[in-house]
Amino acid sequence: MVDTPLKPVRLTSHARLQCVERGASEDEVLQAVREGDREPAKRGRTICRLNVEFGNTWQGSQYAVKQVVPVIVEEEREIVVVTVYTFHF
């Protein structure tokens, strides 16, 4: 896990839509940004990965874990979430 300075986090409208479509809450996204493991992504972006207990059904299948994966751009004064992915296993 990464110790992230307490910059404000802003979700773009696209990221908010992807949360709904991919089954992630905004709280889970914020937690992933603050506590998740980070790795570099294309175009100077960063991926944050956080596994959360799920124990539920998603699209007709049962899964124990959901991985919330926001893609961020860290700017001088804020962290911008540009999209969100989720993976279930």
Image (cartoon, rainbow, N blue to C red):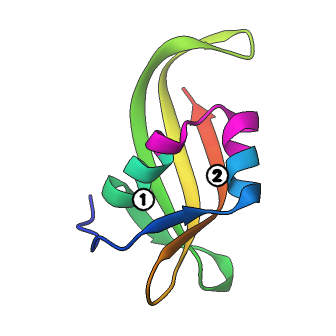
The residue range painted magenta reads: 18-28
Q: Amino acid at mark 1?
A: Val
**Quadrant location, the N terminus:** bottom left
Residue 14 in the figure: left or right of residue 3? right
- Residue at screen point 41% across, 69% down: 8
Q: Is residue 53 above or below residue 81?
A: above
Q: Residue at (65%, 31%) from the top-left corner? A: 23
Compared across the picture, whether 16 is left or right of 30 comes to right
Please state the horizontal and vertical placement of residue 76, each as a whole percent of the image: 45, 90
Q: Name, please, the residue furthest toward the bottom.
A: 76
Name the residue type under label 2: Val
Percent across and percent down for residue 10 are 55, 65
Above/below status of 20 relative to 82? above
- The chief SS type of the magenta part is helix
- State the image quarter where residue 7 is shown: bottom left
Circle 2 residues within 10 Å: few <14, some 14–19, many ≥20: many
Which residue is located at x 44 percent, y 85 percent? 77
Q: CA distance from mark 1 to mark 2?
A: 11 Å
- Residue in front for this viewpoint, 10 or 41: 10
Q: Point out which mark residue 33 bears.
A: 1
Density class for disc 1 (Cα within 10 Å; few <14, some 14-19, many ≥20) is many
Question: Magenta segment: does it hold 20?
Answer: yes
Residue matched to label 2: 84
